[in-house]
């Protein structure tokens, strides 16, 4: 068990360093971007989309394919806009952002399929936005919040990405409920959901399974004083890494509530906690490779 703790300590430092390198600043639209703004809708016009000035709603009516030219997909720059993609896809070439909410509030994004970007959906600044029922798969990062609070990120698919499914950086008082952040697979460190310096968030009933990294694969990870969050009813199983695979990891993150979660069949640990005053209750941790939890006693049954 002591050797296991040493492995986790080393790999935790690697994971923190990796995350600190991907904090981004607001994007600047280029010639390939669609900019949606009130009151006229900006670039939301036929055949791309239909604009309703009364409700400030843009409804896409065709695909946006940037696979041959790159750049960002859609940039939203006014408060209160609703983007309804109606299942149409926004496809990139591995760079840029699929949909960017750039420092504004009260925006709603629904029914969008965003693929093959560095970041699928980005909330950068602002707050009180809604990102529900979207698909942000096959990007480097699926859904990314930075300096953005009081958002609802619910019932999305953020799976099969290359680094992180859903990430919150310096973002407080958000809800992320009922999302699928599974099957992330890539080099070095991988996570389904990650919080960095983010407080008072609620993560309920998310799936963060089968995430695999060449170094570390984790279902849910908190780090860098991500305090006072609630983690309830999530499944963080079958995660694996070349060195460490774990279900739920708390690094220097205190006073969190971790209840009713499942972390089975991870390659190393179900739960790892090196912090203080975190509360674990009714958490399951069966058939993990090295131990149910570190320290022991966080979950039941222990191996």
Image: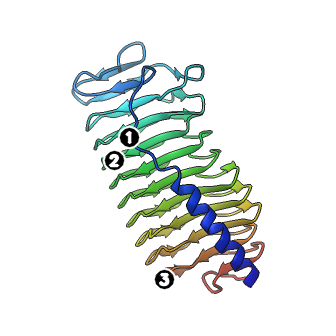
- How packed mark 1 is, by other alpha carbons closer than 10 Å (few <14, some 14-19, many 20 or more), is some
Task: Look at the image and tell me whether residue 73 can be seen.
Answer: yes
Report the residue at 76% width, 76% height from top.
Answer: 290
User: What is the distance, in whole Å, between disc 2 and disc 3 at their CAs?
Assistant: 30 Å
Q: Which residue is denoted by mark 2 in the rendering?
A: 125
Q: Nearer the viewer, residue 125 or 234?
A: 125
In the rendered image, residue 217, in percent from the top left (x then y), is placed at: 68, 59
In the rendered image, residue 8, in percent from the top left (x then y), is placed at: 67, 73
Q: Do the residues labelled 2 and 1 touch (CB within 8 Å)?
A: yes
Residue 276's tag is 3
Report the residue at 44% width, 56% height from top.
Answer: 169
State the quadrant of the C terminus.
bottom right
Give the vertical position of 128 relative to 173 (above or below).
above
Give the vertical position of 109 relative to 8 (above or below).
above
Q: Which of 190 and 300 is in front in this view?
A: 190
Residue 26's tag is 1
């Amino acid at each position: 068990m002591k050797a296991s703790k040493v492995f986790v300590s080393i790999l935790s430092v690697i994971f923190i360093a990796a995350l600190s390198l991907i904090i981004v600043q607001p994007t600047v639209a280029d010639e390939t971007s669609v900019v949606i703004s009130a009151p006229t809708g900006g670039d939301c016009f036929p055949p791309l989309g239909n604009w309703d000035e009364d409700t400030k709603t843009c409804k896409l009516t065709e695909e946006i394919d940037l696979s041959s030219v790159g750049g960002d997909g859609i940039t939203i720059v006014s408060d209160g806009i609703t983007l309804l993609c109606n299942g149409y896809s926004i496809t990139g070439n591995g760079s840029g952002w699929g949909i960017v909410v750039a420092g504004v509030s009260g925006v709603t994004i629904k029914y969008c399929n965003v693929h093959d970007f560095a970041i699928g959906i980005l909330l950068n600044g602002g707050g009180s936005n809604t990102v529900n029922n979207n698909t942000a798969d096959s990007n480097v990062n699926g859904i990314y919040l930075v300096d953005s609070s009081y958002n609802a990120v619910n019932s999305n698919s953020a799976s099969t990405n290359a680094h992180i499914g859903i990430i919150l950086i310096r973002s407080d008082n958000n809800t992320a409920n009922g999302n699928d952040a599974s099957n992330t697979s890539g080099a070095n460190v991988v996570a389904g959901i990650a919080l960095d310096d983010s407080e008072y968030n609620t993560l309920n009933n998310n799936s963060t399974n089968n995430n695999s990294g060449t170094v570390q694969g984790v279902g849910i990870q908190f780090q860098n004083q991500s305090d006072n969050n609630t983690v309830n009813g999530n499944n963080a199983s079958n995660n694996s890494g070349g060195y460490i695979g774990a279900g739920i990891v708390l690094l220097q993150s205190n006073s969190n509530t971790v209840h009713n979660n499942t972390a089975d069949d991870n390659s190393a640990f179900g739960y790892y906690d090196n912090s203080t005053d975190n509360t674990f209750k009714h958490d399951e941790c069966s058939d993990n490779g090295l131990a149910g939890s570190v320290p022991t006693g966080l979950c039941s049954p222990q191996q």
